[in-house]
Amino acid sequence: MVQSRSSASYKWACLWEDGSKMRLRTWTMAVALVLAAVGSSGCVVTVHDGPDRGDARLQNQGWEKLGERLVNGKADRDRIGVGRVEGRFRRVMIVVEHSSIELYDMDIEFTDGSHYSPNLRHRFAENSRSHAIDLPGNARTIRDVTFKYGNLPGGGAATVELWGHP
């Protein structure tokens, strides 16, 4: 730190390697603003150990991951938007990772406006998956899928993935 004189008062400044000066107050404010922005963004970062080999295995069998959601509590409702870009599917599957959940309801809405709700109230263990759920009719284009579920006590946050098979 270098102390400099200006108009009979002392002001602190940082001296950088290239000789330029930056006032400590300005630098402190910049760091505080960045930390406040990151801290208030509401982001949740989840770190998982190693690559997810289950994804590669399902992809090798022709399955496509349509989306995933983090289960945020005892009772939660989430929607995964799929749309026309993803294509047409004959079957879907649910994969649960990192904790156990109880699935209360699942509603599949197709692009033609029709709905299908498989009778699927079930408890999923950590790192498990459903059987392949056949969709009614020929290959269908899915608009979105709505889940109603919750984490089971003592397990932590689960991730629910939706997979589709053409």
Image (cartoon, rainbow, N blue to C red):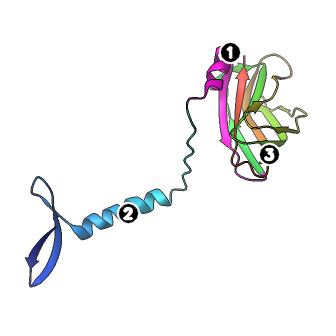
Q: Nearer the viewer, residue 107 or 151?
A: 151
Residue annotated with mark 3: 149
List x then y, in percent, for residue 75. 79, 52
- Report x, y in % for residue 73: 73, 53
Residue at the spot of label 2: 33
Q: CA distance from mark 1 to mark 2?
A: 47 Å
- For this rendering, which residue is in front, 140 or 37? 37
Image quarter (top left, top right, bottom left or bottom right) of the C terminus: top right
Mark 1 residue crowding within 10 angstroms, few (<14) / some (14–19) / many (20+): few
Identified at 76% across, 27% down, the residue is 93
- Amino acid at circle 2: Leu
Marked residue nearer the N-terminal end (1 or 2)? 2
Left or right side of 37 for 103: right
First to last magenta residue range: 51-75
Residue 62 disc label = 1
> What is the secondary structure assignment of the residue under circle 2?
helix
The amino acid type, in three-letter code, at marker 3 is: Tyr
Q: Residue at 25% across / 70% down in the picture? A: 25
Picture quadrant where residue 112 is located: top right
Residue 86 lies, in percent from the top left, at: 64, 24
Give the residue at x 71% y 20%.
Answer: 88
